[in-house]
Image (cartoon, helix red, strand yellow):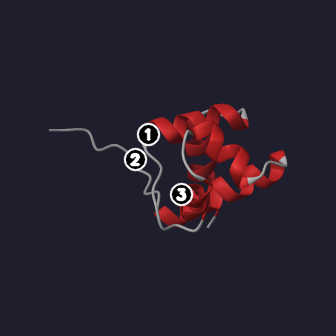
Amino acid sequence: MEKQQNRIKVSVEDVARVLHTLRKKKGLTQKAVADELGISQSNFSKMENGLLEPSAIQWMTFCQLMGISTEALLQDKRRQKTVV
């Protein structure tokens, strides 16, 4: 019998909200973040609006730029789920 893991569903809207919120908290422009990710400002804008998903590498690079681990974001998502 396989042990079932607690899985957290993260929607495109969740990702978009995190991208926007953390970028604003750091006081960075979309262009500055896009340059760090190696993409156009237009593509980063699409990510913030839930129209394009970041790749795993882009997500990890974004987290490094923001000074937060991907694990911390997932833990935050778990806390939000238990509160709601």
Residue 75 sits in quarter: top right
Q: Which residue is mark 2?
A: 6
Tag nearer the camera, 2 or 1? 1
Residue type indicated by callout 3 = Asn
Image mark for residue 74: none
CA–CA distance in space, label 1 to label 3? 15 Å
**Residue 79: % across, % down:** 62, 51
- In front of the other: 16 or 8: 16
Q: Which residue is mark 3?
A: 43
> Crowdedness of circle 1 by 10 Å Cα count: few (<14), some, many (20+)?
few
Q: Secondary structure at mark 3?
A: helix
Is 11 situated above or below 56? below
Mark closest to the chain's N terminus, 1 or 3: 3
Image position of 2 (left or right of 26): left
**Residue 72: % across, % down:** 62, 37
**Residues at badges 3 and 2 in contact (C-beta under 8 Å)?**
no
